[in-house]
Amino acid sequence: MNEWCNIIEIASKSYTCGFCGNQIASDKGYITKDGLSEIYICHKCNKPTYFDRYNNKIPGTLYGKEFKVNIPKDIQQIYNEARKCFSVGAYSAVNMCCRKLLMHIAVECGADENLKFIEYVNYLDTENYIPKNSKKWVDIIRNKGNQTNHEINISDENDAKQLIKFIEILITLIYEIQLEISEGEHDGV
């Protein structure tokens, strides 16, 4: 673990660590001479978080669930990219990642590669990977992703939160719950 040199006590600040995701209150770190910027050290993971004079935080907080179960590597990677994009305010990039995730999820579930995007969405729907009456929120991912990719359109934080939440639900339904069910069957539940 990194050992930080010459850490001082500074005014305590509560924040969510952008590295480990824990809600903490730290009073250890560094402060600029003018007192307008600080670096706090997380007491859980020992990593630094920078706050500027406007209280902007780097790294930002990852939005969305951290999956503890084994989900396919590509899907985990792109989902985490979306979360990291959110943490730095790259909301249009979040939309593009979530759109790409739908394609990867569909292929992982058995769809052919190189289909049109709508065909991936339809595959998830017709093969019942999307719960009945839930195609609306998958269409929101598709439409927002289309707007970001094909139109002069910039996404905002609310759009990005909504898409990450919808993708999180889809990953939970397709991978996490299925894993729990299959483990339960093996355990005789």
Image: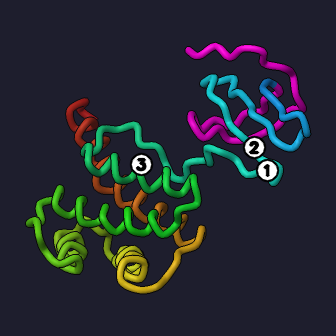
Q: Position of residue 11 (x, y in %)?
A: 90, 32
170 to 143, vertically: above or below: above
- Quadrant assignment for the N terminus: top right
Question: Tell me, what colour scheme is on the image?
Answer: rainbow
* Pointer 3 local density, CA inside 10 Å: few below 14, some 14–19, many at least 20: many
Q: Secondary structure at mark 1?
A: loop
The amino acid at mark 1 is: Asn
Instruction: State yes or no: residue 20 in magenta.
Output: yes
Q: Secondary structure at mark 3?
A: helix
Residue at which label 1 appears: 55
- Of the two numbered discs 3 and 2 on the same chain, state the one appearing first in sequence: 2
Task: Give the residue drawn at x 38%, y 53%.
Answer: 79
Residue range in magenta is: 1-27
63 to 185, vertically: above or below: below
Q: Secondary structure at mark 2?
A: strand
Residue 2 visible: yes
Q: Which of the numbered marks, if any, corresponds to residue 51? A: 2
- Of the two numbered discs 1 and 3 on the same chain, state the one appearing first in sequence: 1
Task: Give the residue drawn at x 13%, y 74%.
Answer: 115
Q: Which of the numbered marks, if any, corresponds to residue 80? A: 3
The amino acid at mark 2 is: Phe
The mark closer to the camera, 3 or 2, is 2
Distance in Å between CA atoms under marks 1 and 3: 25 Å
